[in-house]
Image: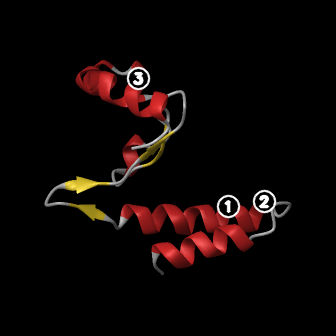
């Protein structure tokens, strides 16, 4: 399962079938989680409020990293990514 296949499956999934959409979303997340950037980078996804939707470390999923002091150093970067809606 590669990124192109995941994107195609998402585009073809019936929008009114929540179960199918959830399965495709999980396939997409698993595909992204397997991606590596450089030697130590990875792909993650946060929503516009800072809640982690997908991360290689499952313990972060569902947490708002903009409200946790341990991630304060990353706040400016994350806020910029949210503002730019890219990254």
Residue tagged 1: 22
Q: 61 or 66: which is nearer to us? A: 66
| Residues tagged 2 and 1 counted as in contact (Cβ below 8 A) | yes
Q: 50 or 60: which is nearer to us? A: 50
Q: How many marks?
A: 3
Q: Earlier in the sequence, mark 3 or mark 1?
A: 1
Where 1 falls versus 38 (above or below)? below
Residue tagged 3: 66
Question: Horizontal and vertical percent for residue 48?
Answer: 54, 31
Label at residue 1? none
Q: Residues within 10 Å of mark 1 (few under 14, many from 20)?
A: few
Question: Residue lying furthest front in this view?
Answer: 84
Question: Residue lying furthest left in this view?
Answer: 39
Question: Residue lying furthest right in this view?
Answer: 16
Is residue 41 toward the left or the right of residue 82 in the image? Answer: left
Q: 39 or 18: which is nearer to us? A: 39
Q: Secondary structure at mark 1?
A: helix
Question: Horizontal and vertical percent for residue 10?
Answer: 66, 68
| Image quadrant where residue 14 sits | bottom right
Q: Residues within 10 Å of mark 3 (few under 14, many from 20)?
A: some
Q: Residues within 10 Å of mark 2 (few under 14, many from 20)?
A: few
Q: Earlier in the sequence, mark 2 or mark 3?
A: 2
Q: How far is the residue under mark 2 from the one under mark 1?
A: 6 Å
């Amino acid at each position: 399962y590669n990124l192109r296949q995941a994107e195609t499956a998402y585009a073809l999934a019936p929008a009114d079938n929540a179960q199918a959409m959830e399965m495709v979303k999980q396939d997409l997340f698993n595909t992204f989680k397997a991606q590596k950037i450089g030697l130590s980078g990875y792909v993650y996804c946060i929503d516009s409020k800072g809640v982690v939707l997908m991360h290689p470390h499952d313990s972060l999923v569902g947490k708002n990293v903009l409200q946790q002091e341990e991630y304060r150093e990353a706040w400016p970067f994350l806020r910029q990514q949210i503002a730019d809606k890219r990254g």
